[in-house]
Amino acid sequence: MTENITLPTDLDAAIGSEKKDFAVKAGLAQPREKSISIIRFGILLTAVSSILVFTFLEPLLYGEEVHFVLNGVPTVASPDNLDPILVPAIIIVVFMFIGISMLSWGIHSLLKKGGYYVGTPIRLVHYQNGNIRSIDWEQFSGEIKFNGNADKGNISLQMRTGRMVSRKNGPDEYVPDVIYMLEIPNVFEVEQICRRRIKENDPTPTTKEHNIA
């Protein structure tokens, strides 16, 4: 499954003499849904911050006063007295910066290519922008999700590692790390190879059943 793919020289050197089960080039680095969610949140945060900028800061540029309530106390800021609005202005600008950053990052991740993935009998190797990551098959839990057609599809491989995520209205939740291979060719064949290699390298001891007479 390596036909029609020319691997980068340093990736080929990293693989060495290991047998290549498959070698594919991914179309995307991150699921579109995640990128779109980041873009939406970035747009929302930027829009709200922009409204606050025009509401509180624009009048000052024209020499007008701004009336607002701070800590329950009616407050007036003017070009000659900026102290009352200094802290709110800094907060608004920070949120606008975060919103623009998230929007930029979302667009970047939506367009970012996924790099190369090479599977060998003992590991999965990912190459992107000159960086190489090697993950032994035993680090994957065996839970695999995939979709697509005979020409192109997506695979997500759940790992044994992860992190705890805090929830507002419930207990903390453990979220496993996931490796995505998105918009790759021969998705069904690659999924079968990954499943077989993960099973072959599973470090979990098998449990044997014994019948008691």
Image: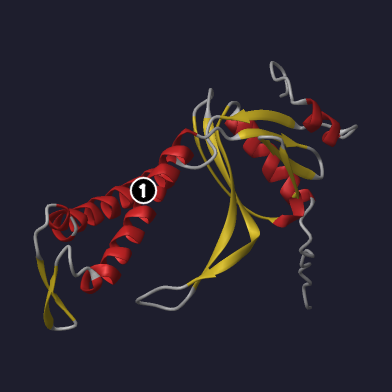
Quadrant containing the N terminus is top right
Q: Residue at x 70, y 20 (%)?
A: 5
Give the farthest residue toward the right. Answer: 17
Name the outermost residue toward the front: 80
In the picture, which quadrant includes the C terminus? bottom right
Identify which residue is drawn at 79% across, 65% down. 205
Where in the figure is residue 12, as x and y percent of width and height? 81, 29
Q: Residues within 10 Å of mark 1 (few under 14, many from 20)?
A: many
User: Which of these two is toward me, 64 or 202?
Assistant: 64
Q: Nearer the viewer, residue 106 or 121?
A: 106
* Residue placed under numbered mark 1 in the picture: 100
- Outermost residue on the bottom side: it is 72
Q: Is residue 105 above or below residue 25?
A: below
Quadrant housing residue 182: top right
Q: Amino acid at mark 1?
A: Ile
Image side of residue 173 versus residue 42, left or right: right
Vertical relation: 66 (above or below) 24: below
Local secondary structure at mark 1: helix
Q: Residue sitting at 75 percent across and 44 percent down?
A: 197
In the displayed structure, does residue 141 sit left or right of residue 173? right
- In this rendered view, identify the residue nearer to me: 142 or 178: 178
Does 52 appear above or below 131? Answer: below
Residue 105 lies, in percent from the top left, at 45, 45
Q: How is the image coloured?
A: secondary structure
| Count of marks placed on residues | 1
Give residue 170's quadrant in the image. bottom left
